[in-house]
Image (spheres, rainbow, N blue to C red):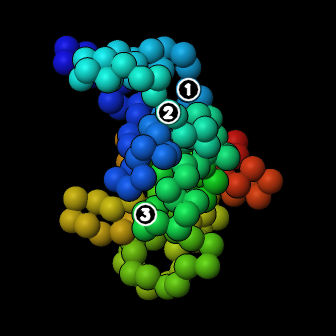
Amino acid sequence: MKNQSHMIKFSVPAKNSHRDGWIYVGLNPMKQKHVDELIAYNASGGIHDEPVIDQGSIVGRWGRSWTHASLERGEPGYKIGGEGSRTYETKKVGPGVQFRPKDDKAIFHVGPDGKMTHGILDYPKTGRAYYYDGNHTCRSGPKPNSKSARLLGDGSYVWDDAKAFWRIKAA
């Protein structure tokens, strides 16, 4: 198989793959070129049937309604797209940051003042944002020099209830 770039865009669940079909895992909505790549991939393995694609996944993982059938049936796993996933919730703030849940408990972390503390990770500028440093220490805010830190600048992270994702409010 010479060109496998399409493998980044599709996945097949371990169970019920023939019934559910291929899951589109790209961030943006699926395009015909992705289907064409999948058809070419299947043909290289001697499969010439039209591929079955899970329709809940074609909006892309940044789509609020992204889902796939195996998760809807309650099989083990975590959301990799759609509302409630880290992928969807952080799409507007860039890579290099994660956010603690709203109902989080007190944890040990390094606050914005650089001091280790035990408490709820929630600060005026960075909200519930955190990252883990090279020593696996939880630190508030985005990872330094990350895209998320550059995007944040002097702004602050705010949760958008209506859209169910984090965004940056300008200073």
Amino acid type, label 2 = Val
The residue at the point 46 percent across, 62 percent down is 78
Q: Earlier in the sequence, mark 1 or mark 2?
A: 1
Amino acid type, label 3 = Gly
Look at discs 1 and 2 and give the one toward the viewer: 2
Image quadrant holding the C terminus, namely top right
Look at discs 2 and 3 and give the one toward the viewer: 2
Q: Residues within 10 Å of mark 3 (few under 14, many from 20)?
A: few
Q: How many marks?
A: 3
Q: Which residue is mark 2?
A: 52
The residue at the point 41 percent across, 34 percent down is 10
Q: Residues within 10 Å of mark 1 (few under 14, many from 20)?
A: some
User: Residue 30 — which label?
Assistant: 1
Residue 63 versus residue 89 in the image, above or below = above
Residue closest to the eye, 56 or 161: 56
Label 2: which secondary element: loop
Q: Identify the image quadrant of residue 47.
A: top left
Q: Residues within 10 Å of mark 2 (few under 14, many from 20)?
A: some
Residue 160 shows up from this direction: yes
The residue at the point 52 percent across, 59 percent down is 71
Amino acid type, label 1 = Met
